[in-house]
Image (cartoon, rainbow, N blue to C red):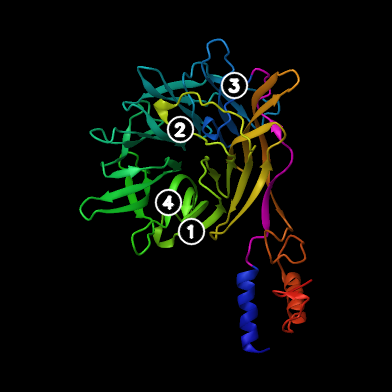
Amino acid sequence: MNRSICRFILLFIVIYFTAPAFALRLAGNPAELTTDPRAYPHTIADEFDFSGRLVVWIDSRDDVNYVPRVYAARLNDNSHTEYLIDVNAFNASAVRTDGVYIAYFVWNESMLALRIADITDINNPVIKEIEIAASYVDSFEVDNGVVVFKENGDGYSIPSVISAVSLSDPFLTKHTVKEFPFNDYSYTNISLDSNRVIWSGEYYDDVNYLYSNYIDVADITDIANPVVARNSLPQTQTGGYIVWINALAVSDDWLIARGSYNDTDCVFGVHNYYDPQNWSFTMIRQMDSYKEFILRVDAPYAVWVENDMQHPEFTGRQMQTQSQSVSSEQGIIVGAVLFDNGKTVTSIIKTSDQNWTLMGAAVSGGKVVWGADYFYADPETESAEEYRDLFTDTLELECGDRGYSLADLNRDCKVDFADFAIMSERWLVCTLPNDEICIDGEVY
């Protein structure tokens, strides 16, 4: 065989046949988590969390004192037992868990505190508090027995600070991870994955009068002596931003961001985010306009909910109970598969059912938990029903749809030489110029 033909075939195999042959879907066995008829879970993604087999949420079922509570349940418990963690989580509107500890902020007119519930014995949770000196907390996360949080300064005399606390420390000692100078602005939430704390922001060089944006990665293996690495994001030759991050989430080698890439509103990924010499950017999902939603990732999966509502980000002391009005577009859950080679596949894994509005989603260990609001108004009686619920299902990979891999020509859910034979046959048939039955090598 001619060498040039061999090279062509080899190049074709490398480029064409390495595309992922999978899409993502739900298994189709949804289970209702909050089966207690009194339950009124908060359904925005910041207001519930999920790690391992533990789901935690803020609940407003108290219709006497109207004080939020914190509840937990285990996915592997078919009886759907609910565990009351805190009966008085006043003004709480965000919660996080790593499967052992639950973290959430409470506040009143005189104080702001980060509460930590140790649920080693889930029937008898042990609750402690970390006092917060700032007027509000911008973001927080808990993982691997460590909680990190950002206390916002006033922009003038009090700097913003990211702190970390080991939850096995009986004194809950605060360790400074990063104190921001006033020309350094962190615009995103912070994310925590094992011993890495990650955030993004913008820095103003007041000597050269230049702006740059960045990803900071803090190694807190030694929590008392964190090491922060600043990684500048790419810019155009004129100093414009190629990448902008509004919100982020990290897991393993992946950073998933909501923002813009090459002037396009999108969700994009940065593979090897902690190693700028080996960064690999990929657009995961393009959007037609700016949208706000909360990303959740547990590699190799990422999920988020899109609808026409503006999902409020967690804002600490400003975290009044968030009203959740019904959206005119009931929303979708988007799922992405994150491959080790830096490639991704994105699918719409759920659309809203009638009268249900999808609000938020979280992922852990191949399971998805989502929150939804139900609203029905009877035009004849002018009565209305409204309630909220949390649901769960398992993620599955599906294949055979050429929308996910052009190389799976025979749609048998794998890419092999059978597909190559079909491609070769079609290529040989379509060798005549201007053949009307051939379009781009396809026989129709």
Closer to the camera, 93 or 221? 93
Between 408 and 85, the residue placed more toward the observer is 408
Q: Residue 281: which disc?
A: 1
User: Which amino acid, mark 1?
Assistant: Phe
- Tell me how far mark 4 sits from mark 1, CA to CA: 12 Å
Which residue appears at 30% of the width and 49% of the height?
A: 203
Q: CA distance from mark 3 to mark 2?
A: 24 Å
Q: Earlier in the sequence, mark 3 or mark 1?
A: 3
Q: Earlier in the sequence, mark 4 or mark 3?
A: 3
Given this view, does label 4 or label 2 mark the residue nearer the observer?
Answer: 4
Viewer can see residue 147: no
Disc 4 to disc 2, how far (Cα)? 20 Å
Give the structural element (helix, strand or loop) at label 3.
strand
Mark 4 and mark 3: Cα distance apart in space: 41 Å
Mark 3 vs 2, N-terminal side: 3
Mark 3–mark 2 CB contact (< 8 Å) = no
Q: Earlier in the sequence, mark 4 or mark 2?
A: 4
Q: What residue span does the magenta drawing correspond to? A: 18-38
Residue at the spot 49% in from the left edge and 56% down from the top edge: 271
Residue matched to label 3:
83
CA distance separating discs 3 and 1: 42 Å
